[in-house]
Amino acid sequence: MNYPAFPLYPGKYALPAVPDPSEHAAYVRLREPAATLADLDGVVLTYQQHVMHYACSRYWNRQLEGWVRGELRVLEYRSRILGICGGFGLGAPMAALVLEQLGALGATRVITVGTAASLQRELRAGEIVVCDRALRDEGVSHHYLGPAPYAMPSSDLTDHLARILRARTTEVRRGAGWSTDAPYRETAAEVAHYGAADVLTADMEAAAVFAVAEHRNIDAAAVFAVADSLVDRRARQNSPVTRNALHVALEAALVALGDTARASQRPGDEALR
């Protein structure tokens, strides 16, 4: 039997959906009528709980309970008010769901901070990679964007994030990532193929985050700390260098979101904060 290309229904990315994320925002506002994230300078998505703990231990913060799936906190960083969201699980579907909910409540800038596996022999654990395009080997992005090999982040936010990281550490690379839904089905043939095409890392969320962000007019970027290798296979370990790299990436993401919010602020906006 011949099956059509994915997604199964042709051209569905251009069709309106029945459910809408505004329904989620309306549900939250039944309990908290003033609920909004429009006054935040941006939100960091994170997948490792120790990154959330690190942020909460260093900066004033408060939890917005029940606003989105997972744990959402607002924190004060260098006089800017930012969000950090985690505890919602791994993978493209969960990242997309949370981003939809954040966007429906008014978030307009997001940086995803997580770990990835290396596809390049010289790229080692603890190095940081800014993802400037993501191969769409997951399912979610194809429901949001038309056929294309890559999903793209915000160029301005990505450029600024890369500049901040390069000013802080020499262990920074920038390039393509491979987003896949099946981490236990990453084959040697794929690793060799994508590695030869200069793809740097494998992750599970970036393509979906970029696709949802483009569809919803949200500025998005992604940064990874390398945790393991798919080339000369080294399994993931609880490495201090990876943890430290994630903390560096988080700090850079907070700076980048605050800076880009300041640059886009209209005269008089500061008085409203």
Image (cartoon, helix red, strand yellow):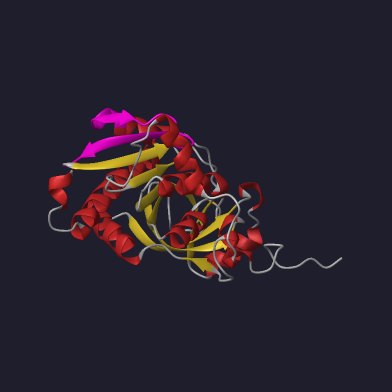
Q: Is residue 227 visible from the viewing direction of this image?
A: no
Above or below for 192 versus 71:
below
In the foreground, 251 or 262: 262
User: Residue 238 in the image: x percent, y percent?
Assistant: 45, 35
* Corner quadrant of residue 174: bottom left
Among the 4 quarters of the image, the one containing residue 30: top left
Eyeballing the image, is 76 above or below 149? above
* Depth check, front residue: 264 or 199: 264
Assign the C terminus to one quadrant of the image: top left
Report the quarter where the N terminus lies: bottom right
Q: Which residue is pictured at 23% across the width and 54% down the height?
A: 261
Using residue 178 as the reference point, say whether residue 48 is left or right of it: left
Q: Residue at x 60, y 60 (%)?
A: 143
Q: Position of residue 101 (x, y in %)?
A: 46, 44
Residue 244 can be seen, yes or no: yes
Residue 43 placement, left or right of 229: left
**Depth check: 117 or 38 in front?**
38
Residue at position x 44%, y 35% in the image: 28
Magenta residues, as a range?
56-78
Q: Position of residue 271 (x, y in %)?
A: 12, 47
Residue 45 lies left or right of residue 55; in this view the side is right
Q: Is residue 203 magenta?
A: no
Which percent across, then down, holds residue 222?
40, 54
